[in-house]
Image (spheres, helix red, strand yellow):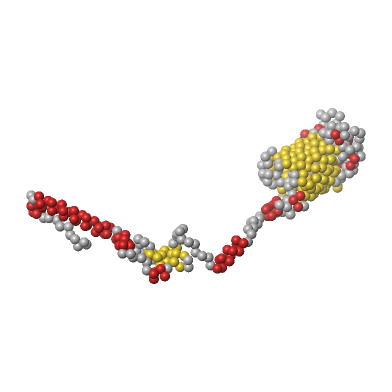
Amino acid sequence: MRNTRILRPSPQRHDKYLHSGKSNVGTLIFIFIVFFLGAPILSLAANPQENTSQQAAHQGAAPSSEAASLGLTFVPGSSSTVIVERDGKKYLVDLASHTVRQAQPDPSDPAPAPAPAAKKQLAKTVAAPQKAPAATSNQDKTKRGVYEAGDDYLFTLPTGRRLDKHGFYVNFNHRFGFDPAFSGPARGAILGGLDGFGIASFGLRYGVTDKLSVSAYRSPSVIGRPIQFMAGYNLMDEHDGKPFNTTFRVSVEGRDNFRKDYTVNFEGIVSRSITKRAQIYAVPTVSLADRRLLGPQLNLTDSPPDLPGVNTFSLGVGASFDIRPTVALVAEVIPTLVNGRDLGIHRPAFSFGIQKKIWRHAFTFGFSNSPGTTVSQRAGTRATFIGDPSGDTPAALFIGFDITRQIY
């Protein structure tokens, strides 16, 4: 059929056939035969590969056993590409472009059996218990053994805990310094001095960063109405893998609503966790132009008297111990080691109590012999406050409490 020619009549014969009905019928028969016999030829010329494959399939052509033993597989419909299998992997070889690439695995093909060594390793992996990933950072390693202080204050001493960045905190400290809790008549009738006149102090703290904080604090007129401004910086923190916590703070306070008798304080706060259930504290403090702690005037509106300033050094120490996950026992003592006698301090200030920690809130209830809560006044005692040398003995302890709340 490849040599078949389509004969076309000459113009003269064409005119002859037009005048003959028999010739017209013969022409139609001839066109019909050429159309149906020429169609396979045109199809073969347009798709030589497909027709060759179909012919091979019709003749029962298949990869030879020799090709299969060599790991060769012919790609259906392609005359220039074969698949070569070697070491359990299949590679697509393009004979026309001389390229080799790994063939994509067929999901229907069974997975190759692992080698004996791989089988042993797989068995060990399956049999071995799965271990949790080990912590890699210092913070993860130490956080489990770091004590979490619930309040900015132990009782009167600062804990130096690091504030959250942009965190806003409120501190409310109350001392019933005029009425002792254990000495005197009818202590039960007046609820251990809670019916007496209280010294309520109030402060705000703000975390500028997670290391730098600022605060403002005020105590009432019965204790000289001092206002204290403070800035503190966290130098080291156990949460960062450091051996202990260190904070440095500078404060300035002035009595009569920051109008006179100014005192500048420098204090370091060092603490160390004893497991995650306890922490100890040391707070060395230098106060420049500190003044004696005095009680209220006859008229609360009167200005407190002017007193000479004395430079002092005190070393407060304390501890906190969790008896429950959210309940701690706290204790502290603040001896004035330099010029304490000039301020009328006969015995060191000390306090103890119990603290309840609830998320961002803490409440501490305890007993103390020091009515002051600012940096310069906390080392003073009730003895100078009421003018009684025995006012700072253990029998003269009074009730106090602290409330701290993180607003955000």
Q: Quadrant of residue 61?
A: bottom left
Left or right of residue 125, residue 156 in this image: right
Residue 64's x, y, as percent? 37, 68
Count of number-bearing discs = 0
Along the line of sight, the residue nearer the viewer: 32 or 6: 32
Along the line of sight, the residue nearer the viewer: 28 or 236: 28
- Residue 288: in sight, yes or no? no
- Residue 243: in sight, yes or no? yes
Q: Residue at x 86, y 38 (%)?
A: 398
Q: Residue at x 77, y 49 (%)?
A: 278
Along the line of sight, the residue nearer the viewer: 208 or 260: 208
Q: Quadrant of the C terminus?
A: top right
Q: Is residue 210 above or below residue 82?
A: above
Residue 136's x, y, as percent? 65, 56
Residue 373's x, y, as percent? 80, 39
Q: Residue at x 59, y 64 (%)?
A: 123
Q: Residue at x 76, y 37 (%)?
A: 172
